[in-house]
Image (cartoon, grey):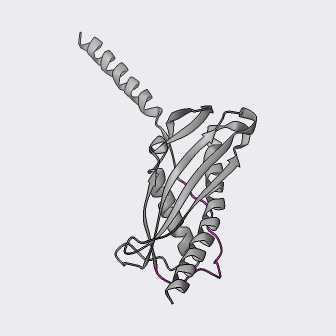
Amino acid sequence: MRHLIIILTFVFICGCANETMSVKDLYLLEPDFPESIADAPQVPINIGHFHTADAFDYKNFTYRKAEGVYEIDHYRKFISPKSSMVENRLTQWLDSSGFNVQPDNVKSEYIITGIINEFYANFVNSLKAEAVIELKIFISTRNADPVSSKTFRAKKPILETDEKNAIDSWEQCLEQIFPEAARFISKSVKARINENQ
């Protein structure tokens, strides 16, 4: 009887070990940072909270398989929520490109927030798989006075239609969106400054 218990325990432990081996793959968005932008406004700005539309508001990869049909990948996911990754990466991106980005505890006149409307890999056409990100940027003043807003959308091909390659394509989407967003933020903030002079 003791031998049977030992064997069953061993089988149970091995089963748990095999279950642990199917650990989910964790990913992080790391788009390349730009060179400095000469026309970045020097007024201090804060980066506020970003949000994700309910349909994509989870860490797992999302795939569009047919018209209106989305699937969640239970084995591939991001290490943190999409909204916080995009928020952190945009903060670093703007800071490295010459913007005067201030930490949260320093109140600035202008605040940048955003919402991720779309964030998925489109596999409807397996020959033309692509990563899709749509990000809306909002600019407001410290007193919650809206300055401007704009939606940015990017699509990048996914090589070999492999889900693992989607991460590179999502990063390329952000590398397209961030410069466009930076120019928009710069232009909008400067226009507001000129209005107030």
**47 lies above or below 119:** below
Q: Where is residue 93 in the image (x, y as percent from the top left)?
A: 56, 68
* Residue at the farthest right position: 127
Residue 39 on the magenta span: yes
Q: Position of residue 15 (x, y in %)?
A: 40, 23
Give the residue displayed 65% in from the left and 49% down from the top.
Answer: 169
Residue 127 on the magenta span: no
Q: Quadrant of residue 5?
A: top left
Q: How many marks?
A: 0
Q: Quadrant of residue 141?
A: bottom left
**82 lies above or below 70:** below
Provide the major secondary structure of the magenta segment.
Answer: loop
Q: Position of residue 66 (x, y in %)?
A: 62, 30
Q: In which quarter of the image is residue 176?
A: bottom right
Give the residue displayed 65% in from the left and 74% down from the top.
Answer: 35
Question: Is there any visible trace of residue 97 in the rendered image?
Answer: no
Give the residue displayed 55% in from the left and 33% down from the top.
Answer: 70
Q: Which of 54 and 22 is in front in this view?
A: 54
Q: Is residue 8 left or right of residue 165?
A: left
Question: Is there any visible trace of residue 4 in the rendered image?
Answer: yes
* Residue at the farthest front position: 195
The residue stretch that appears in magenta:
29-44
Quarter of the image where the N terminus is located: top left
